[in-house]
Every structure is written in C-alpha cells, then in structure tokens.
Amino acid sequence: MASTQQTFRVQGMHCANCSILIHKILSTQKGVTVANANYAAERLILEYDPAVIALETIQGLLKKVGYTLIIPKEGAAEEEEVEKHRAEEIRSLGKRTLISFTLSLPIIFYYMAVHMLNLQHIHALCIGSAEGLGGIFGGEFGCPSPGWLFDLNWIYMVMTTPVQFFVGWPFYRNAFTALRVGSTNMDVLVVLGTSTAYLYSAIGFLFSFTYNIGYQTLWIGFDHPFWESSAALISFLILGRWFEARAKGRASNAIRKLLQLAPQEAIVIKDGKEVTVKIADILEGDVFLVKPGEKIATDGIIIEGSSSIDEKIITGESMPVGKKVGDEVIGATVNVQGLLKCRATKIGKNTLLHQIVKMVEDAQAARAPIQDFTDRVSERFVPTVVVISLISFAFWYFIWGLDFTPSLLFAIAVLVISCPCAMGLATPTAVMVGTGKGAEFGVLLKGGEALEKTRGLNAIAFDKTGTLTKGEPAVTDIVVVGKKSKDELLRVAAIAERGSEHPLAQAVVKAAKDLNPPEPQNFTNVSGKGVMAFENGKKILVGNEELMKQEHITFESSLGEFERLQNEAKTVVFVAHDGELIGILAMADTLKEFAKETIAELKKRGLEIIMITGDNQKTADAIAKSVGIDRVLAKVLPEKKEEIIKQLQSEGKKVAMVGDGVNDSPALAQADVGIAVGSGTDVAIETGSIVLIKDDLRDIVTALDLSRRTIRKIWQNLFWAFIFNVVGIPIAAGVLVLIGLQAPAFVKTLPSLLQSFFKSGLRPELAGFAMAFSSVFVVVNALSLNLFREPKFTKELK
C-alpha cells in the first residue's frame, strides 16, 4: 500500500522543542516518512504507510511521552473536541495562576520591601567592592534569623511548597518526559531554576541556624531563604502559559468560524416523507429540501425549483446568484427565496466547505523553511543555556569570590530568562494568523513556504483564457447599418442564432436574452459561412462575407468597419434582414472585471507582468494592450507553459504563475509561487500555492500583500526573540553588575530602577517574568495581523 499523508491534532505540546521531540520519535519508526509537528497550530503532518505501521501504534508512541494524537472525525466533532480540551486547559491554567499568585504575593511583597529595597545594602554595593556586593545577601540579616523572621519563614515555606510542586507540576511532568527520551525543552530550564531556588532556600533555612552539622560554611552570605524567587518564578511562568493558551486559541479562530458556517440539521425526503436529520447522517444521493432563508445542507444539484442563493460566505460574491434546475449548490450558503429540492452530490469532508477547511488546516500545520533554522537553534539552546548558567556561577563564586547565594542567583536567573519558546512561536503563530486572515478574504495561502517565497517575487505570469479573460465569447460591438436600432439588430440576429449550438451563436443569444427573440423558422446551418432562418416570412442571415456574397447582399460599404474590428482580434459577422444588410456584430473573449486595475496595482508594486496564451500574436497583443501588459508570449501550447516558466526563471526572475488550475497545473507547480484562480465550485486545486476562491483578480493583490505582511511579522518575531536572549542572558549572568562595580559614578546618574540592575543584577523572579513576557509578546505581535485590511484599491472598486 502506498504512503498516505494526513494532518492530525496533537494535544499536550507546550513549547517549541515538543515539535522537535515528536519528529525525533516518529521519524525513526519504520513506515513513517514525514512527521512534522507544529507547536503553535498543535498539528502534525504525518506521511506513513498503513501497511507497515498502524495509526494506533503511532498514537500509542506519542501517548507514552505525554502527547495525545486525535484521530480525525467527521464534521465539526473533531474541532468541538479540540475546543473543549482547549477550554479545559485554559481553565486549568487559570486555576493554577490564581492559586499561585494568592500564595505568592504576600511573600513577594514582603521580601521585595525588606531585602530588594534595603538602602543600606544598596549603599554598600555603590562602594564598588566584592564585599559590598555580598552585603546585599548577607550582613545584619545573617544566620541565625531573628525569631519573628524565623516564624514567618516557616509560614512562607508552607505557602511556597504547593506553588512549587502543585502549580508547577506541569513543568516537572514535561521536563521528565523530554529527559526520558534523551531530549531537552524549556521545562527542563524551568525545573532546574525553580527547583534550585526552592531546595536551596529550604535546606538553607532549615539548617543554616545549626552551627554544628558541618555545613555552616556553605551558607556564608545566606541572609534569607529566597522563597519569593521560587514562588514568583512559577507564578509568572504559569501566568505566561495562561496568556499564551488564550492567545493561541484566538489564532485558530479561522477554522472554527469556517466550520460554524455549516447548518446542523437538514430536511431529507425518505419514502415520500420529510424527515429532519443531522448533517452527519445525510448520504450521497439523498434528496433534501431547502426552504427560503435556510442554509443549504450540503453540496448538491437542484432537481426542482428555482431561487437566488447568497454565496458570499464561500465565493465572496456580493449579490445573490440565480439558480435553476440542474445548477449546483454549495453547502452552508443561504437560500434567499424559493423552495428548492436538491440531490446531495458531496457529503462530509468531500464538500467544498470542508475542502476549504482542510486547506486552511494544512496551511497552518505546514512548516516554513525559516522554521527549520529556528528549530535547530531551539534544539541546541537548552544545553547551551545550562552551560552558560554553570559558567556564570563558576565565575562569580570561584573567580570573583562572591558568596555562594548571590552566585547561585545569577545562575538561576540565566536558566529562567532563556526562552526558546519565543523563537519557536515566532514563525508558526504568524503563519496561523496570516492564513486564517486570508481565509476571511477568500484567499487560501498554503502554508509558510508559499508565504516566504512571495518576498522575492519580481515577475508574475498570467494565463489568458479563464484567468485574465472569462474564457467565453461575448458581444463587444454592435454597429448599425440603416435605420434599425441596436436592440432591433441584436434581436434579429438572436432569432437566427437560437438554432445554433456554436459558442459564438450562444454569445449573441445571451446578449439578447432581455429582448425575448422568438424561435427561428426553417433554420439552416450554412457550413463554414453562417446561419440562415426566417421570421414571419422574412429571411435572416448571420455570417461572413461568403454568406453575404452567396445571398447577394451588398456589404462593401461596411468593409472598413468590418476590418477595423477584426484588427482588434474580434470575431465579426454581418447581419442581413429581408435582403438588406442591417449591421455588424463583433464578439471576443472579454476581460474579467478589474483585470486592468489589478495589473496596474501589481505594476505599482514593482512586478513585471507577462501574459502567456495559445492565441495568435494579433489576438494576444490586443488583449495585452487593453489590460496594460507589455510582455506577451503567444502561440504557447498548454504543455509548453511549464517550459516558459523555467525560461523566465533562467533569466533570474522569481516568478508567480496565475492560472485557472486546469491545463495550467504544471506551470503552477514549476513557478516559485503558483496562484490558482478558483471558481467557487472547484477550489480543490492542489498545485497552487495560493488559491483565490472568489475568482476575483483583485485578490491577487490581497494575497501578495498579506503574504508579505505575514513574513514581516515572522522576521519581527524572530528579531525580538533573538534580541531578547542576546541581551537578556548576559544581563541575567551579571554583566551589568560588573559594569556597575567598575563605574559606580556612572551608575549613580541612572534612574533608581536601572541602578538596581547595575548593583544587584536581575532577580530570578524578574527574569521569569521577562521570559514569560517574551512569549506572550511574540504571540500578540502575530495576532496584530488580524488588523490587516484589503488593499485600498479593492475597496474603492467595490
């Protein structure tokens, strides 16, 4: 059996290294070829051979290391289950946060007031000596502690213990899971830092007042158990996890909103009776009713009735679309008027709505190439931080000669300020929000790779037929010869053309549909020349010069107009009625709405525009001129379009290809970015990196602008995540303190808040707050993509 690729939900991922851990575990399994987990999206793209490894086996492997693989279910059930789990997780984190701060705040306020703001110790540090620095942590509050402080510390230890081991239990569990499989993650740093702070405080407090146990020298400089560091660290970190969980929930709103569009029930006709059933119970081929104002249950075809359908939630079409027997309907769209009886043609995950949902899910789970770099950094980050922490302790304790306690505090601060989570969240969170925002505009961005490649684009190649043009002929010019009006000329021509199935004939009939032309009499198709028919005994001729000559119709005086229209790459026919020429009709494949405006906007963005078509050069040049395209490649066979894209790329261009996804698939795949123009009924185009559901060319500009905005957010996130660690780790290790000791006069000129960092370093609890803040900052920055709006010109044209 061949390999199959699926996207799964994974619950239990809590930091960027989790995705690396899952990849390590699964990629070593026989039968698994691809295993890419996305922490922010909580999804796993898995390619595996079911004949070699069962899905249940994979599920069991992940369960052993603390992750839950959710097997996809029909309809919205899976999403509802995930949202239920997310809500439970947010409630649990909120409960732990409340407990943690309730127990921690009294300790934090007391120790900050008594120890961190002690003016005598700050003065001692300003002298610039190592002894002065140690005075912050020792001196008059040395051991043994006064009785009242001793009593308070007993209380504080009792209050800190549940914070450390109950509130902080998720950190211990996750760290143990990672270490068990030979990996490390952010929780390893958290556990190392907080456990060191707690255990050192507990042991130091319990034994520092006992002078005869042989350990007294270890506690030189230990002025108080720093319960506030352990308690504050856990509190700020769990608060950060709570904020992060809430923010990630908002980032995944796009899929939830899409699924909520679907109705929950439908009226199905069974054995001649109307039965209300759940959407999941509809079968392919079932006949269902749609009353006015109701949502259409599933994709189908109308077998009885006519109506107008509001399809804007799927296609973006602002006006209701008229539908009749034989027309297709889309699930989740709204029946505006009229009773419809439809037959279900697609159900469940085969419907258009679920195809869109799947594309958004896959896009959010896909990895951007830049994420590989950040993941490699994150994987090596934790061991590096542990080494830096040990070096920091060794420097202050063994080289500088600082007491054990302050040296240890520097080491703990390094452990807790380091944040690979911010780096891990930088890319996937922005991709999630960007792709979700695109779905709101009817633009499906297929993941981070497509987004990243839009940055370097400098050329866009357009297929003509079906992309720039509508792909069907339409009447473009009506030239009257004689006294008849344009409407009368069109009506007469349509009478004869009603007997023909030719696309040009149908264009004439369509143009005259409001004029109610009657059925032709004695219709005759004159091969290669045109058509002939009668109305009330009068002959009607519609055709070329040969037909006019055959029927002895004088047309020479109109040849100039005839040739002018032909030079515009239009198909031109003469129309004669009752033996006289009454006019000329010209037909052509017409431009899509807003084609010219879209090309102009793309040019403003510095992109070279190229048109590729199988038409002759004359026709191609005419279309290109009308839309504003300068470079035209004509007479290109469908199978040669891919070679054209390769040729453009060989010129050093980064090319986007825009096509209708039918015969353009090879070119879309070859292009750096393939943009497939959907039709609202066929968006399952696998080759395009970007899919425009609404078949609106303006959305090309929206897609490119949103893609580039998303990539900018990714780089912003990465910049701040790296800068945070590059700046934060040295500060935590005590670099500012060294500067303060060497330049005390400079420190005195600083604001009091900054002076504290130069004098006593960064307290571990503040380092913990900063670490939590960095992750939340990255997520919030990504969420700001929700402020993106369509380009101004699209609004002006609506």
Image (cartoon, rainbow, N blue to C red):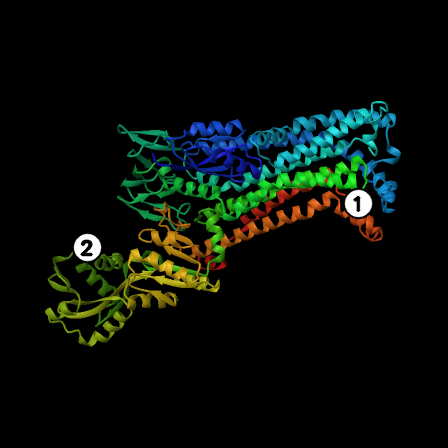
In the rendered view of the protein, which quadrant contains the N terminus?
top left
Q: Residue 72 or 38: which is nearer the viewer?
A: 38
Residue 329 image offset from top left, x and y in percent: 33, 43
The kind of secondary structure element at disc 2 is loop
Q: Is residue 468 visible?
A: no
Q: Amino acid at mark 1?
A: Ser
Q: Does 354 sit left or right of 198 as displayed?
A: left
Residue 41 image offset from top left, x and y in percent: 51, 39
Q: Amino acid at mark 2?
A: Glu
Sequence-first tag of 1 and 2:
2
Question: Which residue is under mark 2?
Answer: 501
Residue 738 image offset from top left, x and y in percent: 78, 47
> Badge 1 local density, few (<14 within 10 Å), some, or many (20+)?
many
Question: Which residue is under mark 1?
Answer: 756
Q: Is residue 573 visible?
A: yes
Q: Does 4 sit left or right of 763 as displayed?
A: left
The kind of secondary structure element at disc 1 is helix
Q: CA distance from mark 1 to mark 2?
A: 87 Å
